[in-house]
Image (cartoon, rainbow, N blue to C red):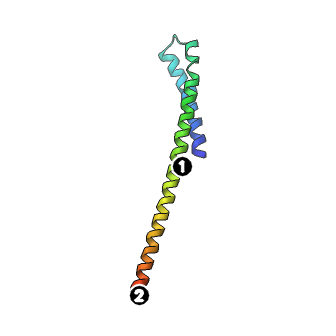
Amino acid sequence: MKKIIATVIGYYLIVFVFAAPIYSFLFPNGGVEETHLHPIYFGLIVLCAIIVICTSIILEETKNLKQEVMKIKDDRKEEKSEDISEA
């Protein structure tokens, strides 16, 4: 959750705070036309948050799956060692 909040805040600061002076310097004749782009920028922020959420969910599930596979391998090794010791 911390990653998601940090990503959204960071992207917001980059787009609306740090990039605004650069944008106004590069395109000095801007004005009302750019205000229609703010919903698009906000959509990019939301999309960025969704990507981070999905990535963290996938990583968590991958780690859980890896742990389950390792547990199954360990159980099989224990069964084989018990079979060898009984023989």
Please name the residue shown 48% across and 55% down the image: 62
Residue 14, x across and y down, in percent: 54, 30
Whole-number angstrom distance, CA of label 1 to CA of label 2: 42 Å
The residue where tag 1 is placed is: 57
Could you classify mark 1 by the number of other residues whose Cα lies within 10 Å: few (under 14), some (14-19), or many (20 or more)? few
- Regarding residue 68, the answer to whether it shows in the image is yes
- Note whether 55 is above or below 72 in the view shown: above
- Note whether 79 is above or below 34 in the view shown: below
Q: Quadrant of residue 34?
A: top right
The residue where tag 2 is placed is: 85
In the picture, the disc for residue 31 is none
- Which residue is more in the foreground, 68 or 21? 68
Q: Disc 1 vs disc 2: Cβ atoms closer than 8 Å?
A: no
What secondary structure is found at the residue carrying circle 1? helix
Task: Name the residue at the top extreme.
Answer: 29
- Note whether 54 is above or below 45 in the view shown: below
Could you classify mark 2 by the number of other residues whose Cα lies within 10 Å: few (under 14), some (14-19), or many (20 or more)? few
Please name the residue shown 58% across and 42% down the image: 4
Q: Which three-letter amino acid code belongs to the residue tagged 2?
A: Ser
Q: Disc 1 or 2, which lies upstream in sequence?
A: 1
